[in-house]
Image: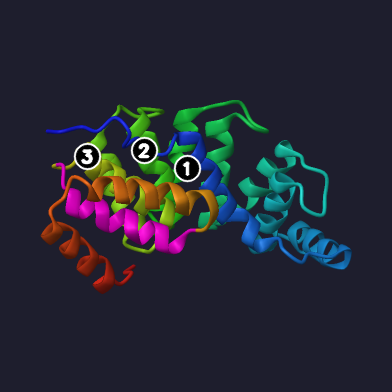
Amino acid sequence: MTVIPKWQKPAYGTALKAVLWLLGSALLWGQTTKDLENIQRAAGQGVASAQYILGSMYAQGRGIPPDYAEAARWYRKAAEQEIAGAQSSLGALYAAGKGVPQDYSEAVGWYRRAASQGDAGGQTLLGSMYDQGQGVPQDYAEAVRWYRKAAIQGFASAQSILGSMYGEGLGVTQDYVQAHMWLNLAASHESGDAQKRDSAVRDEIAGYMTVEQVSEAQRLAGEWKPTK
């Protein structure tokens, strides 16, 4: 197996930040003072979606002073009502030790609950725990299994990491065609530094492939459709 040192999976912290951003920040743009009051009122009345949004606002510090302990409190209320995004977000706080004591096993438990609902963020983060051996024994094949579940839904962070797993041959047989395809898909869904990174790694991998292999990877990426 040829392992190219440059083909490093995104650092766990980087993947975590990307997933947290996707889990929470999309809910927060355009919130006004009136919106905040309404969200707080609904959250206090037990509306799970409002509890999740309020937790995200505390975690991101948008429209309200950042407070991870309050974020954890509201995420927990929503998570206990089976809001998958809140379960993933609460797990992320446990993994990072923000607002709660750091506890990888607790993080895995919440990620697993979200992942079992088909939540791509939870699946990606659960995969990361198996990848890193945090809260569970390190198991690259199990990591790949969860990354794949998120990747086939079109979750760019998972597609990026899955592509790198194929490039490095971790948990799967090394396969440049699959690596190129997944990194290509990830880059097509990303922007900024993430897109530049995955495009660069994809192009690096292409240098070790035949023209026919690159053509096959491009064909697979072009024909790919997300599935649930």
x, y (%) of residue 145?
26, 47
| Horizontal arrangement in the rendering, residue 172 relative to residue 228 (left or right) | left
Q: Which region is colored magenta?
A: 174-190
x, y (%) of residue 13?
51, 35
Front-most of 100 and 48?
Answer: 100
Residue 113 seen in the current view: no
* Residue, disc 1: 15
* Mark 1 surroundings: few (<14), some (14-19) or many (≥20) residues within 10 A: some
The nearer-to-camera label among 2 and 3 is: 2
Q: Earlier in the sequence, mark 2 or mark 3?
A: 2
**Amino acid tagged 1:** Ala
Q: Residue at x 69, y 56 (%)?
A: 51
* Residue, disc 2: 9
Query: In the figure, 1 relative to 204: above or below?
Result: above
Check if mark 1's residue and mark 2's residue have beta carbons within 8 Å.
yes
| Horizontal arrangement in the rendering, residue 47 relative to residue 197 (left or right) | right
Q: Which mark is residue 141?
A: 3
Q: Dot 1 lies on which element?
A: helix
Distance (Cα) linking label 3 and label 1: 18 Å
Residue 188 falls inside the magenta stretch: yes
Q: Dot 3 lies on which element?
A: helix
Query: In the figure, 90 relative to 43: above or below?
Result: above
Front-most of 223 and 49?
Answer: 223
The nearer-to-camera label among 1 and 2 is: 2
Check if mark 2's residue and mark 3's residue have beta carbons within 8 Å.
no
